[in-house]
Image: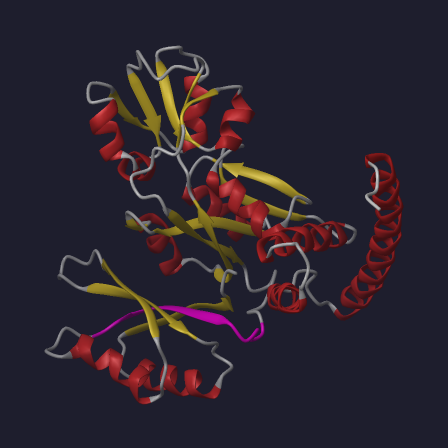
Amino acid sequence: MTQTLAELRIQIDALDQSLLQLLNQRAALAHAVGVIKHAEGSPVLRPEREAQVIHGLQRVNTGLLKAEGVAFIWREIMSACRALEAPQRVAYLGPHGTFSEEAALRFFGSSITHLPCSNFDEVFHAASAGRADFGVVPIENSTEGVVTRSLDLLLHSPLHIVGEISLMVRHHLLRSSPSAEGVDVVLAHPQALAQCQQWLNTHMPNAERRAVSSNAEGARLAAGNPAWAALASERAASEFGLHIAAQAVQDEAFNRTRFMVVCLPSVLPAPAASGTDCTSLVVSVPNRPGAVHDLLVPLKNNGVSMTRFESRPAKSGQWEYYFYIDIQGHTAQPHVAAALQELQGLCAFYKVLGSYPVSE
């Protein structure tokens, strides 16, 4: 017999009350764990533990919920439980409505203290000086490649990487009018302008492209001038009361940006191995024939897979370079440790930027 809408709603209300009771029980247990952690001096956030919890639930999930839905729900549950001890202060490129803010919320959940910053340097300074517990910065985009300023800041910063999040980035044309006609100026972060250049060439060839500190800042400015438009997120449209005049105008349909979560080791030591980890490092080698090739030999000999290799000028005036390398695995794994020990012996400069769980 088919149930009526009213009967189904009664069942949902009863389940919601049961869920609330269970969530409060979980919160009480999490609080008890927090008391023990405080007594031991242990950090509140454990990225590898949270990754293991989410991956474990995704594996045993046999219901209608999709894997990404399970991850989103439990990240918010864990965020709310963490906030009972101390909400994390998280710095990111602001203002409100940026993709960096969205990445921060994806990683930490909504129960955080927001610290929007005007540029990447300020994010690093806030986390280094203790004004923020964590910083979130973009590191690479699937269309435009690495974010060079983030790489340069990581080189000599005391911060290390403790997590990552990969975000699908959809740029919308936002303005005070619902029409895309009559736009004189398009504002966005330089990366966003580059990611949408083909669409702009086709649909707005005569509009000025003006670079600003962030996409959300462009949206804020566009809200004050009817002839201006911004390339930004749906969150930014809501934040500044703008219309989406054109949806998903990025040139690549599957445009993604990878963000790094950074902090001082005193705030959070390197996460333990989770089983699906990445290790990031930066090295330089003496300027001699075959030196770069030799960097790859220790990885090959120890069965370690390299997933990223980028070069940046050392700015010494001597045509020297730093190499940013990502490898699969954690420094605690014997084969990774052996490869890195051998690699370090070949380098003039060597720094592990972090070992951390990969983004789901």
Question: Where on the picture, by quarter, is residue 11?
Answer: top right
Q: Is residue 124 left or right of residue 4?
A: left
Question: Where on the picture, by quarter, is residue 327?
Answer: bottom left
Asked whether 69 or 322 is in front, the reply is: 69
Estimate the x, y position of residue 70 in percent, counting from the top left.
65, 56
Magenta run includes residue 282: yes
Range shown magenta = 272-285
Q: Is residue 266 left or right of residue 137?
A: right
Estimate the x, y position of residue 21 in percent, counting from the top left.
89, 52
Q: Is residue 202 shown above or below 182?
A: below
Estimate the x, y position of residue 309 in percent, counting from the top left.
28, 66
Furthest residue to the front? Answer: 1
Q: Is residue 357 shown above or below 222?
A: below
Estimate the x, y position of residue 45 in percent, counting from the top left.
66, 60
Q: Is residue 295 left or right of residue 235?
A: left
Magenta run includes residue 45: no
What residue sits 65% from the left and 42% below the top?
A: 113
What residue sits 68% from the left and 55% below the top?
A: 74
Question: Where on the picture, by quarter, is residue 224?
Answer: top left
Asked whether 301 or 92 is in front, the reply is: 301
| Total marks in image | 0
Furthest residue to the left? Answer: 289
Q: How is the image coloured?
A: secondary structure
Q: Is residue 173 left or right of residue 159?
A: left
Q: Is residue 333 shown above or below 53?
A: below
Q: Is residue 170 shown above or below 144?
A: above
